[in-house]
Amino acid sequence: MAGPRMYLLAALCLCYFLVKSQNDTAAKTNSYKGHIIFSFGLSEPLGDLALQDYSKSYAGAANTGLAFQLALYKPFTKNFGFCIAFHRESFFINADEIAKVNQVYVNPGYEVSVEVHQNWSASGLHMGLFAQAPLNTKKSIFLEPRLLFGLARAKCPAYTISVDSVVPQTEPKTSVNWMSARSNNLSGTFLIGLGFRHHAKNNWCFSLHLEYETFFSEAEFDDIQITTSNNQSATVKWDMEMKYYTFKFGIGKLFGS
């Protein structure tokens, strides 16, 4: 009988520690004082940035890219709080569209190709308010809208346009290099979005956010350098509206008192 009693005692002790561990986890979750979260996902360009007709001077020919964000949330009431977030978005430029537009300017028997070195990107800092509304009785799932403002800069693409004969020739390949540049102006930004946040055990949290972001003014590129393979160079200007939406998945850590 000693054996079964020992097994029963061990099982009771195990149950006690499991219940205590769950209670401790619940207590930690209930002592939520904020969280820090890293999120990543997709960014979708809008407006002129997404316009694919590169024959127009204001077209960005940008495609879907990547979005990253590191955010700190600090509630000051049960339902509202402050958020500060560093963000970065990129958009892959449509190299095929650039090659197609430039192909009409070359003689028959020659082919245009484009090599991309730098895509569109935007980065900056957001600050503002968030709200949280529990969606279940355990208060582990929250609806989380955000309204943030900030400052950001953009970078324009860099690429090389090459013109080569479709048949082997001794003449060198002709090329034009379009250099990347940071925007000269630091623009105000606006973000509005809606998300869901889930509090898991051991103070981990997960989120999903769909958000719209825009620059208040166009990104101004005043010193884009263009060089050719025959050592000619020029400086051009370009203005671009930066607006897009992002869909991100986040993972983070809760912290308490």
Image (cartoon, rainbow, N blue to C red):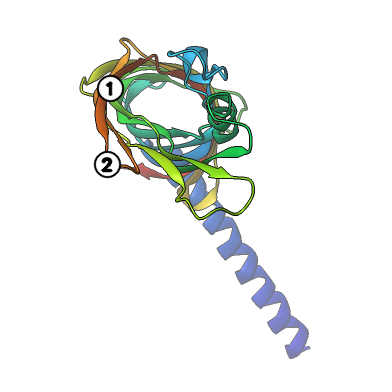
In the rendered structure, the answer to whether residue 240 lies left or right of residue 3 reads: left
For the point 52% across and 20% down, the residue is 54
Image x and y of residue 226, in percent? 30, 33
The amino acid sitting under disc 1 is Val
* Mark identifier at residue 231: 2
Q: Quadrant of the C terminus?
A: top left
Image x and y of residue 151, in percent? 26, 22
Q: Quadrant of residue 224?
A: top left
* Mark identifier at residue 236: 1
Q: Quadrant of residue 97?
A: top right
For the point 28% across and 25% down, the residue is 152
For the point 72% across and 80% down, the residue is 7
In the rendered structure, the answer to whether residue 204 lies left or right of residue 218 reads: right
In this rendered view, identify the residue nearer to me: 176 or 56.
Answer: 176
The amino acid sitting under disc 2 is Asn
In the rendered structure, the answer to whether residue 2 lies left or right of residue 257 reads: right
Count residues near mark 1 (Cα–Cα under 10 Å), then give few for <14, some for 14-19, many for 20+: few
